[in-house]
């Protein structure tokens, strides 16, 4: 039986297989080298920070891994169209297909190894750069190596005390609080180059998503939740901040830009802003990892008389959306 | 059913769907509130724009929704809209007649005046740079335009008696109110800048930021800068 099947395989097809494999190997080697070395440095989101550079590396590795697969599919497709077309007027049926244990085992083994390797690689890549720039929830599992618990009240460059920046989403603007500089709040996002940063991301109303694209940082901003993300900027320059979670009518306009400064420039900006906003900072609630907008402890007499008990109501209720 | 009838039904259904989708798209695209054009009224590099804020609006099908109104410079009539057009590279002098009552800001950070010339607003002629809505009845809405870094808390009537006796028919012509004035410069190039109240003041409807807060023509709008 087996001998009969083998007898049915034309010699021409065996030569095709050899050619296909040979061409595939050559193209794959060239393609992988081109993707890794030529395209890799230009992969998004760039290399402005540790997390961005890490994501760029991940994208490069995944693209390189996928290159032989893509080349194999396209090559087989092209080869079939070019050489395996029936001749004009040829109405005979094709040769019957039969199972092949060796091919099946090889296919399952190769794809299993590939998936498992990528799973291990992905898990390691999440751990090594401390979450890879993603939000890790209120109690981050991975922190940047060498840092210690952040102090809420002070920050000195060059020490292991990580810089904290609170990101507050609200419809439809971002604000940023710097607890180690008196807790001032501003619409400007400034960061020092070469210093690890801990973003504490939260929201005052609905779910937003803080996405600092060039920094490779993306963390959901949930009301009453502190979502922590880490990064260390590599280069000075500007980066964009967008909301990546549909959050209402002006969601599309909820973008901003941030700046990575030299350490002396950052310290100078922070101290100057702390002084400039001192009067406003006194009006703000004490720095906290989350804020409950329904609670205003210092309501004035008139507000109390008017029966106003919160800052324009609470969060969206489960019954929403509703119309009056 | 014959083949011809089936084909006709299929084509008819397809045309119906296309027309329906087109109608909905056109309805939403062209249903924005009217735009008040202040461009012809700019003189000497300046233009005066006048708004009012009302605790309700009795001119629409949503009478309980708080709303801005803009004064038409030609007829001096109040128009229920939040869309206006101004020239580029011009000083815009804004006057807002604030007829609504006080509401605490969700984030007191928005009590600070930013982005205006001198970073101040004038409340009944008195310069103000910060209003503390958590400590006193002082703020009713904000005029916030993130694209230009503008945030102006709109001062409110301050006493219980005033806040209990607010204007009840729109557009308001009498009743307790504050006159808020500020100026800012438009950019040198044209563009559209969204603005909003950031209180959130849609209290009682969608728990703050829904309803009037999320509907152009009420508490959210757009400034078109004409180059």
Image: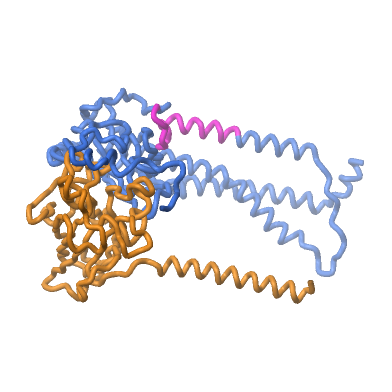
Quadrant (top left/top right/bottom left/bottom right) for the C terminus of chain B: bottom left
Query: Where is the N terminus of chain B found, in terms of image quarters?
Result: bottom right
Task: Determine the residue positioned at 31% across, 37% down.
Answer: A294
Q: Colour of chain B?
A: orange
Q: Position of residue B103 (x, y in %)?
A: 24, 46
Residue B142 x %, y %: 23, 52
* Above or below, A255 relative to A304: below
In the picture provided, is B112 more to the left or to the right than A111? left
Judge whether B226 appears above or below B203 on screen: below
Q: What range is drawn magenta here?
A: A116-139
Secondary structure mostly taken by the magenta-highlighted segment of the chain: helix
User: Residue B223: in sight, yes or no?
Assistant: yes
Which colour is chain A painted?
Answer: blue
Q: Residue at x 88, y 45 (%)?
A: A5
Residue A189, picture quadrant: top left
Asked if residue B149 shows in the view, the reply is: no
Horizontal relation, residue B2 to residue B157: left or right: right
Q: Quadrant of residue B178?
A: bottom left
Across and down, in percent, residue A126 comes to 46, 32
What sort of colour scheme is used for the picture? by chain
Please state the horizontal and vertical placement of residue A157, each as a whole percent of the image.
22, 30
Q: Residue at x 86, y 65 (%)?
A: A91
Residue at 39% of width from left, 46% of height from top? A46
Residue toward you, B39 or A299:
A299
The answer to whether residue A117 is magenta is yes
User: Can residue A29 be found in the magenta stretch?
Assistant: no
The answer to whether residue A244 is above or below residue B24 is above
């Amino acid at each position: 039986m087996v001998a009969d099947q083998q007898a049915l395989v034309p010699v021409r097809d065996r030569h095709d297989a050899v050619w296909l494999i040979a061409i595939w190997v050559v193209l794959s080697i060239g393609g992988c080298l081109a993707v890794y070395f030529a395209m890799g440095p230009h992969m998004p989101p760039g290399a402005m920070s540790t997390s961005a550079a890490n994501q760029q590396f991940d994208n490069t590795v995944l693209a390189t891994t996928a290159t032989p697969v893509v080349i194999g599919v396209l090559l087989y497709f092209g080869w079939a169209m070019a050489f395996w077309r029936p001749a004009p007027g040829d109405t005979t049926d094709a040769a019957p297909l039969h199972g092949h244990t060796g091919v099946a085992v090889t296919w399952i083994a190769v794809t299993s190894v590939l998936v498992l390797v990528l799973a291990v690689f992905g898990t390691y890549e999440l751990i090594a750069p401390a979450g890879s720039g993603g939000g890790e929830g209120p109690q981050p599992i991975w922190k940047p190596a060498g840092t210690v618990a952040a102090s809420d009240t002070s920050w000195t460059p060059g020490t292991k005390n990580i810089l904290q920046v609170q990101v507050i989403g609200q419809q439809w603007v971002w604000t940023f609080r710097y607890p180690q500089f008196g807790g001032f709040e501003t619409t400007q996002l400034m960061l020092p180059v070469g210093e690890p940063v801990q973003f504490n991301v939260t929201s005052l109303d609905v779910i937003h998503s803080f996405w600092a694209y060039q920094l490779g940082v993306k963390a959901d901003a949930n009301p009453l939740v502190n979502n922590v993300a880490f990064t260390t900027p590599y280069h000075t320059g500007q980066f964009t901040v967008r909301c990546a979670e549909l959050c209402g009518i002006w969601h599309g306009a909820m973008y901003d830009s941030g700046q990575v400064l030299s350490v002396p420039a950052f310290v100078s900006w922070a101290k100057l802003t702390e002084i400039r906003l001192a009067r406003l900072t006194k009006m703000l609630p004490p720095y906290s990892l989350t804020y409950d907008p329904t609670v205003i402890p210092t309501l004035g007499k008139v507000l109390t008389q008017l029966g106003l008990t919160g800052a324009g109501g609470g969060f969206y209720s489960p019954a929403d959306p509703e119309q009056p | 059913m014959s083949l011809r009838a089936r084909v006709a039904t299929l084509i008819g259904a397809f045309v119906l769907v296309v027309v329906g989708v087109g109608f909905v798209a056109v309805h939403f695209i062209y249903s924005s509130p009217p735009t008040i054009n202040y461009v012809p009224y700019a003189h000497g590099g300046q233009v005066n724009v006048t708004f009012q804020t009302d605790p309700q609006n009795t001119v629409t099908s949503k009478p309980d929704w708080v709303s801005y109104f803009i004064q038409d410079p030609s007829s001096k009539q109040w128009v229920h809209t939040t869309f206006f057009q101004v020239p580029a590279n011009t000083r815009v002098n804004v006057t807002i007649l604030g007829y609504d009552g006080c509401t605490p800001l969700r984030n007191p950070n928005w009590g600070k005046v930013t982005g205006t010339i001198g970073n101040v607003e004038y409340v009944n002629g008195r310069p103000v740079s910060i209003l503390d809505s958590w400590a006193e009845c002082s703020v009713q809405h904000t005029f916030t335009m993130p694209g230009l870094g503008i945030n102006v808390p709109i001062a409110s009537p301050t006493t219980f008696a005033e806040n209990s006796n607010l204007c009840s028919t729109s557009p308001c012509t009498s009743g307790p109110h504050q006159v808020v004035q500020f100026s800012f410069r438009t950019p040198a190039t044209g563009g559209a800048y969204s603005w909003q109240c950031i209180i959130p003041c849609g209290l009682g409807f969608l728990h703050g930021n829904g309803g009037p807060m999320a509907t152009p023509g009420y508490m959210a709008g757009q400034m078109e800068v004409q180059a």
